Amino acid sequence: MTTPRDLRLVVRAAIRTQGLTQAAFAARAGVHRTRLLAWLAGRRGVSTETLGRLLAAAGVRSISVESLNSHTARADESGGK
């Protein structure tokens, strides 16, 4: 199963390999920079929609629905969306 930490690592790697700043990556994904930074630090969850935009900007083509549901459930439990 893909964990939220795994997803953050994928996005971090994409930011590096694409040669972007975090702000530029956030703009590409249509997410506010502070939301991206809080999510990357594990301080805040994101909605499934936002996660989808982040992963799309990272070049991820597919992910299991189970992984998304697990991530969203953890975000809901922590109060972050």
Image (cartoon, rainbow, N blue to C red):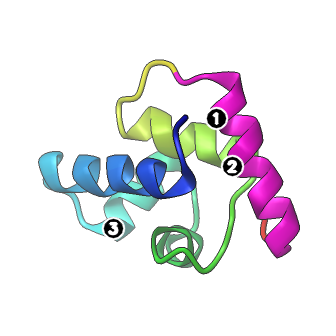
| Magenta-tinted stretch | 63-79
Residue for point 70% across, 28% down = 66
Of circles 2 and 3, the one toward us is 2
Please state which amino acid type lies under the numbered disc 1. Answer: Ser
Residue 68 lies in magenta, yes or no?
yes
Q: CA distance from mark 2 to mark 1?
A: 6 Å
Q: Is residue 7 left or right of residue 11?
A: right
The secondary element bearing badge 2 is classed as helix
Quadrant of residue 23 within the rendered picture? bottom left
**Prevalent SS, magenta region:** helix
Q: Position of residue 61 (x, y in %)?
A: 44, 19
Q: Is residue 51 left or right of residue 9?
A: right
Q: Upstream in the sequence, badge 3 or badge 1?
A: 3
Quarter of the picture holding the C terminus: bottom right
Q: Which residue is mark 3?
A: 22
Please state which amino acid type lies under the numbered disc 3. Answer: Gln
Q: CA distance from mark 2 to mark 3?
A: 21 Å
Q: Is residue 6 above or below residue 35?
A: above
Q: CA distance from mark 3 to mark 1?
A: 24 Å
Q: Which residue is mark 2?
A: 71
